Amino acid sequence: MTQAQTNAALSFEDFKKEVIGDYKIASISRECSLLGRREVLTGKAKFGIFGDGKEVPQLAMAKAFKNGDFRSGYYRDQTFMMAIGQLTIEQFFAGLFGHSDINHDPMSGGRQMGGHFATHSLNEDGTWKNLTQQKNSSADISPTAGQMPRLLGLAQASKIYRNLPNIDATNFSESGNEIAWGTIGNASTSEGLFFETINGAGVLQVPMVMSVWDDEYGISVHAKYQTTKESISEILKGFQRDEDNKGYEIFKVKGWDYPELISVYEKAAKIAREEHVPVLIHVTEVTQPQGHSTSGSHERYKNADRLTWEGDFDCNKMMKEWMVSSGIATQDELDTIDADAKKEVLEGKKAAWIAFTKPMQDERAELVSLLEKLGANEKVANYISDLKSIKDPIRKDILSTARKVLRLVIKDGAHAELSSWIQNYTEKIQPKFSAHLFSNSEKNVFSVEEVLPVYNEDSQDVDGRVIIRDNFDSIFAKYPESLIFGEDAGNIGDVNQGLEGLQEKYGELRVADAGIREATILGQGIGMAMRGLRPIAEIQYLDYLLYAIQIMSDDLATLQYRTCGKQKAPLIIRTRGHRLEGIWHSGSPMGMIINAIRGIHVLVPRNMTKAAGFYNTLLQTDEPALVIECLNGYRLKEKMPTNIGEFKTPIGVVETLTKGTDITLVTYGSTVRIVEQAVKELEEVGISCELIDVQSLLPFDINHDIATSVAKTNRLLVIDEDVPGGASAYILQKVVDEQNAYKHLDSKPEALASKAHRPSYGTDGDYFSKPSVEDVFEKVYAMMHETDPAKYPSLF
């Protein structure tokens, strides 16, 4: 219902019916919050964080929300999700209980705590649904303000679709008319990600409506400690647009004023949808009837006056009073709605609990039946009795019991059936908790066949940056939905000229400069990728990636996992790193990165041809990846392939650069060139090295070629420019443990890494901070000395 509809199109009876329908949703949502808290306190659910006190403003937001729109929100938006028809009572409680069946908890299949909402963007086979025909919610995350960077990209996608008509927008946009709706608690506006996103949206002028639910507290901390002037709209007044300057439209509205909320959200939607102007709605005088969460009581930090005020200005109570005074409903009618809501929510909760517990009851019965056939062993009988006595067993209880009993019966020959049951049960249940970290669709990274670069007699030696540039030119011509953006990526064609001239050729929307705001550069990419575009987000240097690592780790890397494969964001992140000069331009924190972003592929090409091949591969897949180009490789000469834009570097496959018999050397990136020179010098003293370029850290050597090499050489050295215990430790674990190369070793596997400190400045800093040719030579030589001291006498 909009105000215009109320005045022009609806009879008073229709108007009453719609308002009463809204109140029913608010009442049901409130009862879900109240009963949900009780379920936690009685032990059926582990934790609860609810949307009570925010019901009425969320009803208003839902009315302005259209098919094709996207929400990027806050874990108190349950009323909104109910109002747009994307959350039922049973689903609410399934999420609270952590039901691991996506059909019961469509938000996350039990992978996220309740209050974290999502809709399904993908069909069962991983292909896109028609997002323009449904109301969409990007999957929530818990980190406060972590939803903001993605919001920027969701909004920017509409701008791209509106202004680049040659893109096939069939499933994704109708002329860029979609709004990205953000929600956040007032205290979380203190986060830098909020301000970075607000600024970015103001600069880009994208259709974003940002709602701040202001209840004056961040957990127990009052707004006076959170926000200057205790008002986010007050301090953002400078963002207000005027006749001469673009900016925001800013509204302030009370969270209990139903008719005014409807009016404000209607105005906000019209501005954002039609004009592509961002809007901030500061919703004040919001309450939080049960405090922050089930972990504590707000009576501990709110005084009596505040608690009384919250009771008086509860939005549901105020809406009821307005409905009675306006003649929309009587007090008795509204009391009946509340009573019916209690019954409906209670029945929905019971149904959700039965659906949650019944499969585990059946699984327990199956195991008990099997265990009872094992005989009268007293200890086994005790385990059976303990398991049967659990009123509501969980799968941990079931499997733990089975595994403990297995130890007791292993020697009497009765274990085979139980062993088989445990293995089958684990294979069946484990995917409920572990599947979909990566794509299972036909477009996963392993579906793309390698295509080698082609050369002929006329192939010229060119700077590596020319290969990258011309390959991007081919990409942008081939994929209209592709675009790239980052610091200095546009006008000057990136700091290393890998995009030289491409903005002039393809326009400022497809090859774009961005502000110094790495987290929201990543967010732009995530949001646009979630809406069917193929963005390449450029982070100028690898060291700067740390500004964005939280967004990569908490949002992008977990997206497919936390939605059980129902959402995806095939974003390509481009950066450059390794050896240059100085503490903040020559880092290689690969161990930190690969362990923080599982769910994103990490590719480390040694030259620009390999890098270009990775981009060509990734654009035929539906998975996110980080490509780290070698910073000192743009001016090095490479032969120009004749099939630019077509050759593809395989992902997860190593390359053996030199054959050898004495020792296997494993490295990647810029360090390859160091090791290549050392290999030549080692050959001069009779040491034959097999040099392997990893190329891809995530995934890693899927064919186990390194173990095959170690089986031949019986020795292993990993060389890396990360800190000790970083990526080299990861590689050793993969090769020695996972690939079982330990059984082929005749000497200790070793690693040669950088010093523990950041690299010092200049060429000498590099030499004394990171592995040098001499370091590699001496390390290998020492390993050979241990094997044959007579042939290789000690150097030191």
Image (cartoon, helix red, strand yellow):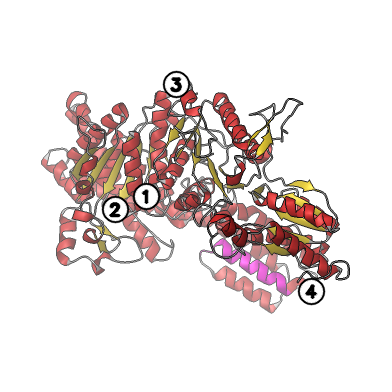
Crowding at label 4, few (<14), some or many (≥20) Cα neighbours within 10 Å? Answer: few
Calculate the distance from the C-alpha at mark 2 to the C-alpha at mark 3.
43 Å
Residue that carries the numbered disc 2 in the rendered image: 52
Residue that carries the numbered disc 3 in the rendered image: 165
The first of marks 4 and 2 along the sequence is 2
Calculate the distance from the C-alpha at mark 4 to the C-alpha at mark 2.
57 Å
Residue that carries the numbered disc 4 in the rendered image: 411
User: In the figure, 710 relative to 62: above or below?
Assistant: below
Q: Nearer the viewer, residue 786 or 384?
A: 786
Q: Which residues are magenta?
A: 392-408
The percent coordinates of residue 756 (x first, y second) are 57, 65
Q: Is residue 226 magenta?
A: no
Calculate the distance from the C-alpha at mark 4 to the C-alpha at mark 3.
72 Å
The first of marks 1 and 3 along the sequence is 3
Calculate the distance from the C-alpha at mark 4 to the C-alpha at mark 1.
59 Å
Label 4, secondary structure: give it: helix
- In the orientation shown, which residue stands out farthest toward the right? 790
Calculate the distance from the C-alpha at mark 2 to the C-alpha at mark 1.
25 Å
The percent coordinates of residue 771 (x first, y second) are 65, 59
Label 1, secondary structure: give it: helix
The first of marks 4 and 1 along the sequence is 1
| 287 left or right of 787 in image | left
The first of marks 4 and 3 along the sequence is 3
Q: Is residue 170 visible?
A: no
Q: Nearer the viewer, mark 2 or mark 1?
A: 1
Residue that carries the numbered disc 1 in the rendered image: 193
The percent coordinates of residue 312 (x first, y second) are 15, 55
